Image (tube, grey):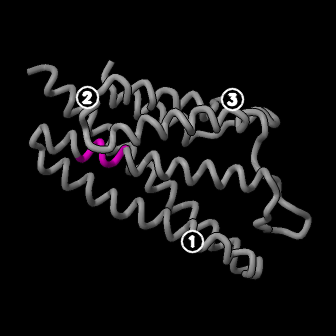
Amino acid sequence: MNPFHRIFGGLLLVLIDIHFGQIEVLADFIGYLLVLSALNGMDGNLKGMKGARSTALIISVTAIPQSFLGQPAGTNEGVNIGFDPLTIYHQSLGLIKLVLIFYLFYVLIDWAKKKEDEDLERRTQKLFRVYVTTHIIYYALLPFSMNLSENMAIPLFIVGIAVVIILEIMLLVLIRAFHNEHHKIALY
């Protein structure tokens, strides 16, 4: 099976959150294991591969409890970014995922470079810069959000979540392009 197809499927599983009570039906750790298996099936000499494999293994194990813990609950006072263990755990998983995506972008860029596909390489570098910069800004501003009034915090959260979801979809579309390119190369 095409490794990019497994990466696509794994990241799609991570993106989709379906809960049955507290239990997550499509567990994120399964998606991360798919990404890890895809990375293990690829050329180990690609730039960033060692970091991507290590981070995928770490997040696969770390995300197992998330399947049973559910999402952090809101409070009666409205929006509140607290320092409770569940919120810290979920934010930590988000940061580990950002590190995984960081290394994954390096793998994708190096793969495109070795296949001499300049268009795909340029497209990947462009999305890499936007994706990582946006996420770093999001995580940097998150602690300051607790000082905002609810009237300001809720619209900012909605905009932030919308931007992050759009970037995740753009990443999936890019990985699909890598899948198609790999498929073309396999046919020749």
Amino acid beneath label 3: Val
The range drawn in magenta is 104-109
Could you tell me which quadrant the N terminus lies in? top left
**Relative to 30, is 123 on the left or the right?**
left
Say which residue label 2 marks: 43
Image depth: mark 1 or mark 3 in front: 1
Name the residue: 44% across, 31% down: 35
Name the residue: 33% across, 48% down: 105
Distance CA(mark 3)–CA(mark 2): 32 Å
Amino acid beneath label 1: Ala
Image depth: mark 2 or mark 1 in front: 2
Q: Which of the marked residues, 3 or 2, is nearer the chain's N terminus?
A: 3
Tag 1–tag 3 contact (CB < 8 Å): no
Residue 70, quarter of the rendered image = top right
Tag 3–tag 2 contact (CB < 8 Å): no
Q: Position of residue 4 (x, y in %)?
A: 33, 31
153 and 100: which is toward the camera? 100
Q: Which of the marked residues, 2 or 1, is nearer the chain's N terminus?
A: 2
Could you tell me which quadrant the C terminus lies in? top left
Crowd band around label 3 with a 10 angstrom C-alpha radius: few (<14), some (14–19), many (20+): some
Compared to residue 136, the image places residue 166 above or below, namely above
Distance CA(mark 2)–CA(mark 1): 34 Å
Residue 106: say if magenta.
Answer: yes
170 and 61: which is toward the camera? 61
Residue 141, quarter of the rendered image = bottom right
Q: Position of residue 161 (x, y in %)?
A: 58, 61
